[in-house]
Amino acid sequence: MKPIYIAAYHQSKFGKLFAMTVPEIIAAAVTETYAEIGAEPSAVDLASIGATCNFSLNEQGLLAGLVAMAPGLGGKPIEAVENACASGGQAVLSVVQKLQLGLGEVGIAVGYEKMRDAEGKMDGALIGKVLGYFSHPDEREGKTYVFPHLFAEVMETYMKAHGATERDLAEISSREYANSTHNPWAQMQKVEVSVDEAATAEGRNRYIVEGLPLKTYDCSQITDGYAGLLLATEEGLARLGVAKADCVEIAGYGQATDPLRKAGRDILIPYGAYKAMGMAYQMAGERPDDVNVAEIHDCFTVMGAIGAEVIGKAEYGKGAAYWRDGKADPKSGECGINTSGGLIAKGHPVGATGIAMIGWSAWQLLGKAPAELQVAEPRIAATFNIGGPICASVCTVLRRAE
């Protein structure tokens, strides 16, 4: 298969887009990604866009047509993809696979989510209901906030199975908030949360579901934002005038989907996630031991723990301890995980999340991350993007091009 390279990455600051309309957001995602390298729009052969709440929150469909409104993209193959919170990652894989099939030499993957109103306010009950659509109907009954409830159950299961404590998982939240203070694109850029604050249920940090351990600081953010990746073959890089040595290669990828219903499967060993990650490693010819940069889908702190296990940096059941022991820290750790601040502190604009994971990892490999967050001598990066109750999994392995 043809090698595929990341020629450019761009993202908005995550948080609030205020009065920007969906057409304006998508236009910005496309044109600002082009602008990172001064690319001509006509150089792009195809595109894919990922989003999740466009119908329910934005009253907008046919997003591919909005992408086609960007200069140079009219009349070209464009599609919209939805795979819950893995929509961004799925958009990237769609472009990669089409380029490998020979349908073009340059493609662009963009993703966005607009979850707040023009004043930056959110309707928590509505958002909770809308996101709940991405679960099995039988598992929604009796749950006010479906996904926090489902992952509170996962958190309880993890703690009981592995002897982890609420404080162990609070370490993940605290460390990610610390990272986000140095990330100028992060939603929670000026907020610091100590381990004591994240571990203690008081004030803002309340339990979400009575009788279950999940608290506010265990949760990712409600976020507006957009992101884009310009992807190319070697021929495409020549067309763009970008040197291969300045790029990152998407060396391996994998995608797999487990049954939507959480009940009846081992949620602590999500088969699809491990399969997708294994496929990515095999395609890249790399091993988890080689990875020292990673972005994983910590929609809740327990997924920070499970994600460290899925990418192979922590043994089964030791993911929370990996974070607690500082092994995920950007400077002193073994592997800088979620140096961006992760979904918990960087933010979680659902359709943009998977793209942002890959883009931030590329910045790390190129030495372009903020100095306080830059991993020394970055070698190989892994990303793990999920949708639903650990249902859809999109994984990649990245390395600097040679």
Image (spheres, grey):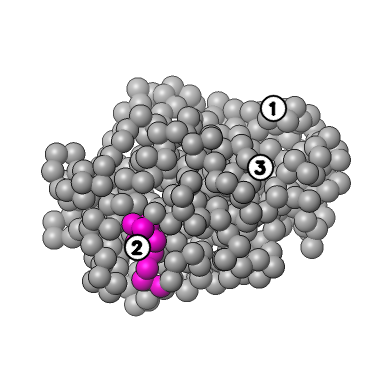
Q: Which of the two discs, 1 and 2, labels the residue nearer the N terminus?
A: 1
In the displayed structure image, the side of residue 371 where residue 64 appears, left or right: right
Q: Mark 1, mark 3: which one is toward the viewer?
A: 3
Question: What is the C-alpha distance between the residues marked 3 and 2?
Answer: 29 Å
Foreground residue among 68 and 278: 278
Q: Residues within 10 Å of mark 3 (few under 14, many from 20)?
A: many
Question: As shown in the figure, which amino acid type bears the numbered disc 3?
Answer: Leu
Q: Residue 355's x, y, as percent?
A: 57, 45
Q: Secondary structure at mark 1?
A: helix
User: Is residue 317 one of those drawn in magenta?
Assistant: yes
Question: Magenta-highlighted stretch: main secondary structure?
Answer: helix
Q: Mark 1, mark 2: which one is toward the viewer?
A: 2
Residue at horizontal 23 percent and vertical 62 percent from the top = 165
Q: Which residue is mark 2?
A: 321
Q: Which quadrant holds residue 156?
A: bottom left
Q: Which of the two discs, 1 and 3, labels the residue nearer the N terminus?
A: 1
Foreground residue among 259 and 65: 259
Residue at horizontal 40 percent and vertical 33 percent from the top = 181
Q: Which residue is mark 3?
A: 366
Question: What is the C-alpha distance between the residues marked 1 and 3?
Answer: 18 Å
Foreground residue among 166 and 44: 166
Q: Residue 125's x, y, as percent?
A: 25, 42
Q: Name the mark on residue 35.
A: 1
Q: Which of the two discs, 3 and 2, labels the residue nearer the N terminus?
A: 2
| Name of the residue lying farthest toward the front | 332
Question: As shown in the figure, which amino acid type bears the numbered disc 1?
Answer: Ala
Q: Residue 124's x, y, as percent?
A: 27, 40
> Would you say residue 213 is visible in this rendering?
yes
Q: Find the magenta span and give its range.
A: 316-325
Image position of 158 with respect to 239: above or below: below
Image position of 370 with respect to 49: above or below: above
Q: Secondary structure at mark 2?
A: helix
